[in-house]
Amino acid sequence: MKGFNLILSRALDFDQLAGLKFVPGTSWLHRLHPMVKLGLLLGFTSAVLAFTELQRGVLLLSLLVAAYVSSGLGWRYWVRKLRFVLFYTSFIVLVQMLARQQGLPLWQIQLGPWALTIWSGGLLQGLTIAFRFLSLIGVSFLFVATTDPIRLVQSLIQAGLPYRWGYMLITALRFIPGYQDDFNQVRLAIRLKGIRHQGFSFARLMNMLRYLLVPLLSTTINRVDTLSMSMDGRAFGLYSKRTFMNPLPLTKVDIMISFVGFLVLILVFFI
Amino acid sequence: MGLVQQDPDAQICSFTVSQEVAFGLENLQIPSKDIKLKIKRVLAMLGISHLAEREVTNLSGGEKQRLALASILAMEPKVLVLDEPTAHLDPEGIMSMVAHLETLKNQYGYTVIVIEHRIEPFYKLADRMVVLEEGRLASDESPSTVFPLYRKKLDKTLRKSLKLRMDLAVDNPREPLLEVEGVVVRRAGIPVLQNVSFRLKPGEIMAVMGANGCGKTSLLLALLGHHQLEKGRVSYRGRDISHLDIQERVKEIGMILQNPGHQILERSVWQETLLAAEMLKPTRKFTVEAKNLLEEFSLLNYRNSSPFLLSMGEKKRLCAVSALVYEPDLLLLDEPLAGQDAGHLDLLMQHLYRHCEGGGSVLMVCHHPEVVASYCHRLLFLEGGQVGYEDRPDKVFQWLKERGKDAYLPLREGDRWEKK
């Protein structure tokens, strides 16, 4: 039962889940216009999905690693934030190596009565899948870590997104730390009342979820209520358009980088 | 008209101070150049220019309160309405808030309406005092007319619990219920409690005071076992409980969290009242005690209602009832008086005295120096996670006075009632 409690508490541990956020900085990626960055993200993602060869996978992942290094986030960030992805991709490679019997046998391992053979085709396929997976997740992390959400939403609004929709995203992001805190406080309250996971049954699990979710929902509703009153009280929605303290114009550097990025992706197609 | 709500954190919708102040101006379609000028002016007016680029998550409670005020002032309303602006502030924060409102009123000509339970800090500032009772206007006079009536009523109420107060001897001979020795706690690598030591004896109510962020809540959570000790020892009735987890400690230690919204779990007020009691002391029946407490705390009419629909003050009272009903020996209370009127404040204190008469003790985070002076046996003052001074309240207040911390001193009669 202790094992079950441990798994449940780990699975519900927001601190482990909420590692993805904007990291302030002054690198070229931080300064890049969010719409250009969004365009590069879509282009890169499309390329990763379009190519199935290992060589192109390695090339795209190398480009991504170079972008990470130049963003000032560094290797530590890469390893720390993507460790669960690295673990998962290692598992994929292992399964492919053992399960896919194609190409040449590379190694044979004798485990008692069982003989496990590692095949070259399996290894190649495993690495291809792992690199694509790492590239897709890694580029999303890089985008989030280098893009100020306010600037992103502002650029989307400037591009024509209704600002009410844009602010739905901003306020959601603004309150993520608050939700984390609420979650931890409700968990504390559950323990304070002496409620324990006593044996596993569907009814008990549902009861625990109710104790956890109902106060969270109630707190969220109160928060939303206060926030909407605060925003309405400051003329939110009074006019169909709004101005910005710091408008985001597209600079020459932005145009140049988007052009270079486009060229690089075209080159990857023809290599 | 601009409204500043009770919880400053919940009304902030941006990430930095400048963005937050700009929000309303952007909605009013003010040009970028003018927005920047207005932000600069309003931040200077409230003395927070240095916070302009600070992230809102890194602000203290008082700074958030001033930011909420700045974001309204930037839109240049004629009338300012503040809903319980002192609810989340320490005494220094309250003093600063009152000074700013005084400037806004006297220098800039704003009309300021403050909705408050704690009227003492606003006595000198107010020109009119409006009292609402059960949804109707009870009086609308100058404070000098209304205050004496209010005071008479207040004194009558306070007398009930002060009669119950046990005047404990200076050297309480009983063995300590709780002994805290050299406790060190770190959160995210930052020390929040440093070498904290004190004793709490049976029958004592100890108040914990200090500025926002000085470690008051962390201390309570460390005693409960929620925060792990890096160093030090917590003993309960002479037994080291440092290694016990929360679920072992809550059998003897009850706690009311700062935000009651987090602590209410059940579907009805009645179920919520009995939840902890039934879980922690399943062999006893508590229905009579629960009914009596709900009645005394004006909650019995809501017994079948959802507790989530109660007001903030009512939720606080419900949390107090659900802790009092199962009678844990030690009560840890994190700002239990926030949002309570004088009558309910006194009622809670009466119950705390009864709890102490039975050999229990109370450790209570409190921002009301007057309450501490009148009701508490001991006062622990925390500064930057360390014990500044711990003794009888009059001695600690004297110590605070010598250090120029006037905001933490109980208001003298003259300060309170005579408008200068």
Image (spheres, rainbow, N blue to C red):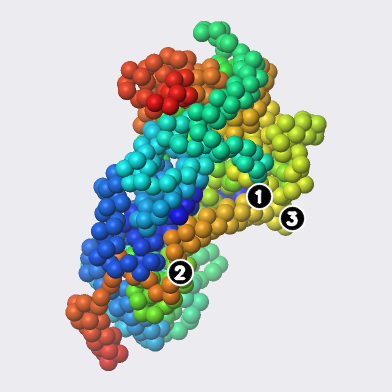
The subunit letter for the residue under badge 2 reads A
Q: CA distance from mark 3 to mark 2?
A: 48 Å
Please name the residue that numbered disc 1 is placed on. B308
Circle 2 residues within 10 Å: few <14, some 14–19, many ≥20? few
Using the image, determine if residue A95 lies above or below residue B54: below
Left or right: residue B355 versus residue A77 is right
| Callout 3–callout 2 Cβ contact below 8 Å | no
The subunit letter for the residue under badge 1 reads B
Left or right: residue B134 versus residue A245 is right
Q: Residue at x 45, y 69 (%)?
A: A238
Amino acid type for the residue under numbered disc 1? Phe
Q: Residue A169: percent from the left, percent from the top?
A: 45, 67
Circle 1 residues within 10 Å: few <14, some 14–19, many ≥20? many
> For the image shown, how many numbered marks are present on the structure?
3
- The quarter holding residue A108 reads bottom left
Q: Which label was assigned to residue A203? A: 3
Amino acid type for the residue under numbered disc 3? Ala
Front position among marks 3 and 1: 1
Q: Which label was assigned to residue A41? A: none
Please name the residue that numbered disc 2 is placed on. A238
Q: Residue A246: percent from the left, percent from the top?
A: 28, 67
Decide which of A212, B236 is in the foreground and name it.
A212
Front position among marks 1 and 2: 2
Q: Residue B95: percent from the left, percent from the top?
A: 39, 33
Amino acid type for the residue under numbered disc 2? Leu
